[in-house]
Image: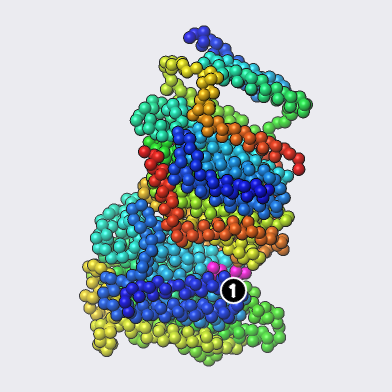
């Protein structure tokens, strides 16, 4: 196929989901089935288009140097240069054009069944389409500006979807939190974009990143503010800020677990196909900027350290969670840490590989957990009906929403793993697919994708270690330990959920989900197992030879992308048994340990979880290292205090906002100490609120005096201003 | 009443050629602003038709006063003489004082008019005193002449000149609502009829910036090294105060008032840049901000009930269910104010930040970026309230749809989106305007 | 020179005293009369600055027409005596501050003037500011501001009517 045609197809690929969003919102939002059909068909169309581009791209030898380009159109003609908005597919983009639409399509199909009983079914599909379309747009963008536009669009979609069950206060709080937290990163990214533009005069990736001259100039220019690093390094770090937000890296990881408030397909979208991958994608795009500073430069150090910290943080917290989705959420944070750490040590190919395999098995795990929740939920309803009590409650449940609703929460939590057990027999398809995903996550040797990609990272880290790189050493040790924990919590999760005997009646009566839900699981399970074989290292004993020329395909395909790979000659690397042994030991060791603790003697109903024996450490981990509380004290409260106090002095709205502020504070405390007695707080804030209000009422009498206050402060300001002018004039 | 409006439209559209060669300039800059003021005025008139009916403000005087004020603003765009700047500012302000008080039986409307009048008069005092001092120092009120004399070092009394510049800056800062001269804004915006508030928030601010650009980037350009840090400081203060205080507002109109203060801060950042990019940024931002803010206020007026308007944010809970279209418009406006692409607000902010960085005001750009992160919180809160909460009380029947308002909503929404997605044509216009500005400059 | 200076000093003292009297007087009629005195002294100052037209206008328009209007209103409303209301408690602290700031502004202005105008060599304005010259200027180069000002007055009249009209 000609390049022009491929360029046009690339243009077309993101459009169907975006159009489907518009059509659903404007025309079909009253018709549930038609809307979901439109969304699924649109996504599949996009998927087909992308595949055509992908398989053609694979056949192009010099894709790295000469990517497929679509027609560009002029967006903002500025005085000196022109912003051209266009599309392009290079090896990195091509691999994403394979993974993203495939994962999205499966999630869409799954959602048709999962969300079937939701009253806002059409709205859900509208936002889901927009989400998928935005991610596709981001992948094919050939410049930072349109990438940023789609980036923000995704931020908005995630906000809308996380807060989808908006009647649940925790849901819209989580939505705001996700949006605000990622926005901190976005702003750093925007600064990076602007800085890049002032330095190079263009935002096109290929003009900057694939141009050795520009890169060298950037590396040679010292950064502003006298930070002692090069412009390239500062830009890379600022852009990495965007990744930290979007891909939930420490210290901005706090939003991701809360994002579990959204429906499960949304979690799958966010965790596998869209949001978090976008962050890593961006960082991979800017890899040349990191690389140009040489090995162990400041930017690499920052990226590697953050990645390592995140990997460890996520893995430790995941060990101490009960909520089936939260375990997965922290696992995602941890795995993203793996990828970022891989980038930090310069293991570009390994990071891409792990990202893709993770996308498949994590989507699988999320949808599997959704299936479990669905099944347990049905079991619970069944029990409730059988007992003849709670009729109204169950009815409401059924009417309101199948899986997660506000009303369901207090009595019975279908997401709590302590309420499960023994589901292996009740939900066999879910069990076996989940098992495949879990083993991939744990890195079960040789037969799972996760093993190959994780091994690749460890091998590259070890290679760096043997050449004396500091960051590689840190990354190797931390990741190996995190991988051990990963295998352990995976074994814990699978055992608690599926093995042993049912611990509640709901679990005992759980039913297997509909085919629309199990079909995507099966497809993804295939990928979770076999995807690893696209990148078996060439010199791997036995298997490497078995795959012959196909071995290491992904890595060599991806690597054509990078110009001037002096710093990291990945090809030069020879096979070493130590990292392989490490991966074997941590994967099997972790799984074995988990089996010993949980698998051999499954938990009985009412029995406490063995990890709780860790005491204080458990509490610390269970409460996620207290990050949320810390942020509340450090950032949110002072900001509120400043805003509130300013108003107290000058503003008229004293009463209203003080009331609101107190109320918020009350809610905040109640949120922090979840089990704390709510009655006391609401009662207390009412009392204080009333007092403030009555004071305020008297304060209003003085209102007429305020003009004088305004004039006076303006006068003071004018005098000060004048002094400034006269001083500066001298 | 309708006749007055219909008569006013061609009057606005035909406003084309005026020439008093030495005191007013007819250049691309002035014409660009004329266009902006005309569009804003048309939207306001379209909105007011129904609004006044709803609120029982049945006064024919509304429209001529609006026209007088718009005329003053246009004159401001044309002014290249300090005397004209002063007269224009009075001409645009005095009708506004009256307009604020038009919902007269309501106490807050009267309070609004009174406060605006007192503070406006105060500001005019500063302005005229500053102009007098500049005249005293240079012997002329002609901006080009002032610039020439300063560059040629023909001004012996520089101290007098600086004092004059300071006072002019104070006077104009009042008009654009920059901190610390912003205190009147929330009270006045809250009390005035909503359409008047919309007019003040958009057109008056634009006129103020038109004057700031002309006076400082043209007449006092040779003094740039002195005023640049001061205006940058004002910009930083304004962004911080506006955004932080907006956080704690519970009244939508007051929140928008503080938001308008914050946006004045962003615009001041463009002025402080003192370069062509800054001027481009300011002009572009004025347009994008005008459309966005008008969209927000237009949506607000649609929510009028016969009983009056409930401006508290709580009243917007669950709006999406009651009136999805209006909720979407308001949501879009909030996103644009936050600066989320692909809305016009994003492109405008982008230019301003770029301009600031170009003139080495990196710290200012960082403050701008940080405050806009903060701003996301309160803009989003509106969206959360509209889309994700249940209505608090039984909602009153909304004012029914009406042609004028629908057209106004459509204009503003299209503006917000089109300039966000396809900014090129507008940018072309802005560049023409800036070029014209530069030509007059030298 | 000296005779002019003496006249100026005397007039200036009267003028300032009249202004203070205006502010401190509790009787509205007295206050108005003080204001007339103030206007008159200022008019004489204008005369000394070679601006006879301005001086006459000052007398006829301000001291004459407007003040008569003021006095009429005061007497018709019977509002001769102002209320002895104490300043609102919240505003008491403002008075010293206002005085301080006023003094500061005065010092600033004085600083500017004294450092720059220490010599008395400013040439007397030789341009005759007579009615004809002013007329020619107003309707010549300053026609636009003049016309705009007239619109301004129209707006002010509309405003006065609109805001006071009964419903």
- Side of C79 where A227 appears, left or right: left
Label 1 sits on residue: A29
Residue A187 percent location from the top left of the image: 44, 58
Residues in magenta, as a range? A160-168
**Quarter of the view holding residue B148:** top left
**Above-or-below relation of C76 to B361:** above
**Circle 1 — which element?**
loop
Give the dominant element type of the magenta stretch: helix, strand or loop. loop
Image side of residue A252 versus residue A220, left or right: right
Residue B168 rendering spot, x and y as whole percentages? 49, 35
Quadrant of the image containing the C terminus of chain A: top left
Magenta stretch containing residue B160, yes or no?
no
Q: Is residue A47 visible?
A: yes
Please give the chain letter of the residue carrying mark 1. A
Tally of numbered discs: 1
| Percent of width and height locating residue B203 | 55, 46
- Residue sitting at 35 percent across and 85 percent down? A445
Q: Residue furthest top?
A: C3
**Relative depth, front residue between A228 and A475:** A228
Is any part of residue B245 visible from this angle?
no
Is A158 displayed left or right of A477 in the figure? right
């Amino acid at each position: 196929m000609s390049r022009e045609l491929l360029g046009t197809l690339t243009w077309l690929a993101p459009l169907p989901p975006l159009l489907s969003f518009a059509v659903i919102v404007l025309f079909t939002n009253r018709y549930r089935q038609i809307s979901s059909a439109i969304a699924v068909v649109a996504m599949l169309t996009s998927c087909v288009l992308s595949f055509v581009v992908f398989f053609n791209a694979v056949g192009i030898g010099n894709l790295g140097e000469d990517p497929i380009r679509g027609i560009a159109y002029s967006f903002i003609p500025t005085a000196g240069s022109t912003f051209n908005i266009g599309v392009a597919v290079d090896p990195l983009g091509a691999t994403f054009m394979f993974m993203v639409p495939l994962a999205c399509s499966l999630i869409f199909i799954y959602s048709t069944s999962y969300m079937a009983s939701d009253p806002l079914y059409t709205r859900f599909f509208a936002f889901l389409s927009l989400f998928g379309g935005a991610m596709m747009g981001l992948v094919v963008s050939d410049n930072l500006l349109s990438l940023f536009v789609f980036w923000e669009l995704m931020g908005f979609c995630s906000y809308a979807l996380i807060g989808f069950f908006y009647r649940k206060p925790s849901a819209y709080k989580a939505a705001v939190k996700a949006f605000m937290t990622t926005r901190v990163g976005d702003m750093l990214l925007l600064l990076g974009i602007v800085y890049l533009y002032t330095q190079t005069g263009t935002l096109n990736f290929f003009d900057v990143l694939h141009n050795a001259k520009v890169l060298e100039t950037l590396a040679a220019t010292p950064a502003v503010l006298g930070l002692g690093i090069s412009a390239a390094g500062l830009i890379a770090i600022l852009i990495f800020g965007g990744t930290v937000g979007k891909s939930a890296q420490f210290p901005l990881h706090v939003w991701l677990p809360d994002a579990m408030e959204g429906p499960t397909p949304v979690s799958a979208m966010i965790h596998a196909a869209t949001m978090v991958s976008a962050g890593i994608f961006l960082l991979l795009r800017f890899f040349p900027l990191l690389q140009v500073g040489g090995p162990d430069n400041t930017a690499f150090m920052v990226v590697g350290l953050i990645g390592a910290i995140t990997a460890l943080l996520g893995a430790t917290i995941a060990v101490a969670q009960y909520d089936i989705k939260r375990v997965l959420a922290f696992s995602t944070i941890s795995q993203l840490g793996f990828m970022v750490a891989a980038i930090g040590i310069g293991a570009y190919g390994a990071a891409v590989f792990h990202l893709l395999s993770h996308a498949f098995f994590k989507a699988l795990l999320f949808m599997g957990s959704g299936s479990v929740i669905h099944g347990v939920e049905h079991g619970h309803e069944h029990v409730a009906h059988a007992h003849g009590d709670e009729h109204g409650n169950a009815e409401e449940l059924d009417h309101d929403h199948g899986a997660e609703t506000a009303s369901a929460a207090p009595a019975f939590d279908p997401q709590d793993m302590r309420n499960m057990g023994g589901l292996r027999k009740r939900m066999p398809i879910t069990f076996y697919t989940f098992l495949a995903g879990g083993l991939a996550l744990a890195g079960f040797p040789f037969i799972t994708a996760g093993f190959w990609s994780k091994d690749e990272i460890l091998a590259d880290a070890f290679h760096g270690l043997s050449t004396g790189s500091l960051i590689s050493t840190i990354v190797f040790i931390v990741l190996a330990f995190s991988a051990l924990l990963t295998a352990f919590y995976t074994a814990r999760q699978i055992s608690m959920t599926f093995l042993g005997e049912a611990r509640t009646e709901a679990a005992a009566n759980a039913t297997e989900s509909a085919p629309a839900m199990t079909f995507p699981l099966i497809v993804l399970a295939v990928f979770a197992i076999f995807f690893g074989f696209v990148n078996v290292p060439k010199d791997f004993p036995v298997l490497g030879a078995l795959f012959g020329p196909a071995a290491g395909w992904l890595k060599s395909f991806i690597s054509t992308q990078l110009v001037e790979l002096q710093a990291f000659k990945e090809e030069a690397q020879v096979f070493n048994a130590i990292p392989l042994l490490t991966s074997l030991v941590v994967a099997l060791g972790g799984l074995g340990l988990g089996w010993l603790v949980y698998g051999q003697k499954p938990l009985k109903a009412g029995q406490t979880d063995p990890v709780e024996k860790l005491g204080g450490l458990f509490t610390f981990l269970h409460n996620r290292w207290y990050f949320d509380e810390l942020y509340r004290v450090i950032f949110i409260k002072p900001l509120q205090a400043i805003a509130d106090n300013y108003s107290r002095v000058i503003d008229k709205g004293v009463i209203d906002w003080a009331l609101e502020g107190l109320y918020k504070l009350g809610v905040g405390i109640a949120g922090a100490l979840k089990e704390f007695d709510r009655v006391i707080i609401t009662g207390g804030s009412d009392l204080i609120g009333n007092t403030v209000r009555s004071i305020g009422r008297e304060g209003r009498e003085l209102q007429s005096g305020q003009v004088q206050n305004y004039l006076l402060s303006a006068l003071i300001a004018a005098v000060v201003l004048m002094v400034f002018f006269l001083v500066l004039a001298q | 009443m309708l006749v007055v409006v219909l008569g006013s439209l061609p009057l606005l559209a035909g406003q084309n050629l005026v020439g008093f060669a030495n005191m007013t300039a007819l250049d691309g800059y002035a014409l660009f602003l004329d266009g902006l003021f005309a569009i804003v005025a048309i939207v306001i008139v379209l909105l007011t038709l129904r609004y006044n009916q709803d609120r029982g403000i049945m006064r024919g005087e509304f429209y001529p006063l609006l026209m007088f004020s718009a005329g003053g603003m246009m004159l401001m765009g044309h002014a290249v003489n300090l005397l004209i700047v002063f007269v224009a500012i009075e001409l645009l302000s005095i009708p506004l004082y009256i307009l604020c008080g038009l919902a007269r039986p309501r106490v807050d409307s009267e309070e609004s008019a009174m406060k605006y009048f007192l503070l406006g008069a105060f500001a005019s005092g500063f302005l005229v005193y500053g102009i007098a001092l500049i005249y005293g120092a240079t012997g002329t009120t002609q901006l080009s002449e002032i610039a020439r004399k300063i560059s040629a070092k023909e001004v012996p009394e520089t101290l007098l000149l600086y004092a004059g510049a300071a006072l002019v800056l104070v006077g104009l800062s009042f008009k654009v609502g920059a901190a610390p001269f912003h205190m009147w804004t929330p009270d006045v915006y809250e009390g005035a009829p909503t359409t008047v508030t919309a007019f003040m928030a958009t057109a008056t601010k634009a006129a103020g910036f038109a004057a700031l650009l002309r006076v400082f980037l043209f007449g006092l350009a040779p003094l740039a090294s002195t005023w640049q840090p001061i205006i940058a400081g004002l910009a930083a203060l304004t962004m911080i105060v506006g955004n932080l205080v907006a956080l704690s507002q519970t009244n939508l109109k007051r929140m928008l008032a503080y938001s308008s203060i914050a946006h004045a801060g962003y615009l001041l950042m463009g002025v402080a840049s003192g370069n062509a990019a800054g001027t481009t940024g300011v002009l572009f931002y004025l347009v994008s901000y005008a459309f966005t803010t008008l969209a927000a206020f237009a949506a607000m007026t649609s929510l009028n009930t016969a009983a009056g308007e409930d401006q508290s944010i709580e009243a917007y809970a669950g709006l999406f269910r009651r009136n999805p279209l209006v909720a979407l418009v308001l949501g879009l406006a909030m996103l644009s104010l936050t600066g989320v692409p692909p809305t016009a607000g994003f492109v405008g902010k982008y230019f301003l930040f770029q301009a600031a960085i170009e003139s080495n005001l990196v710290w200012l750009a960082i403050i701008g970026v940080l405050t806009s992160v903060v701003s996301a919180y309160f803009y989003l809160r509106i969206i959360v309230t509209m889309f994700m909460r249940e209505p608090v009380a039984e909602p009153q029947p909304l004012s029914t749809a009406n042609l004028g308002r629908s057209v106004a909503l459509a204009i503003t929404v299209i503006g917000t989106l089109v300039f966000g997605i396809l900014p090129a044509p507008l940018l072309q216009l802005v560049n023409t305007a800036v070029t014209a500005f530069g030509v007059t400059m030298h | 020179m000296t005779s002019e200076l003496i006249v100026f000093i005397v007039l200036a003292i009267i003028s300032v005293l009249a202004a203070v009297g205006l502010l401190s007087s509790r009787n509205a009629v007295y206050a108005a009369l003080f204001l007339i005195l103030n206007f008159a002294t200022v008019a004489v100052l204008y005369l000394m600055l070679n601006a006879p037209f301005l001086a006459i206008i000052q007398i006829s328009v301000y001291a004459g027409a407007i003040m008569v209007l003021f006095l009429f209103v005061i007497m018709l409303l019977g509002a001769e005596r102002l209320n002895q209301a104490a300043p609102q408690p919240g505003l008491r602290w403002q008075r010293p501050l206002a005085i301080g700031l006023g003094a500061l502004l005065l010092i600033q202005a004085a600083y500017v003037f004294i450092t720059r105008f220490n010599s008395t060599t400013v040439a007397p304005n030789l341009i005759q500011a007579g009615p004809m010259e002013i007329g020619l200027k107003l309707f010549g180069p300053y026609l636009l501001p003049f016309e705009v000002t007239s619109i301004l007055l129209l707006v002010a009249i509309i405003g006065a009517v609109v805001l006071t009209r009964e419903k």
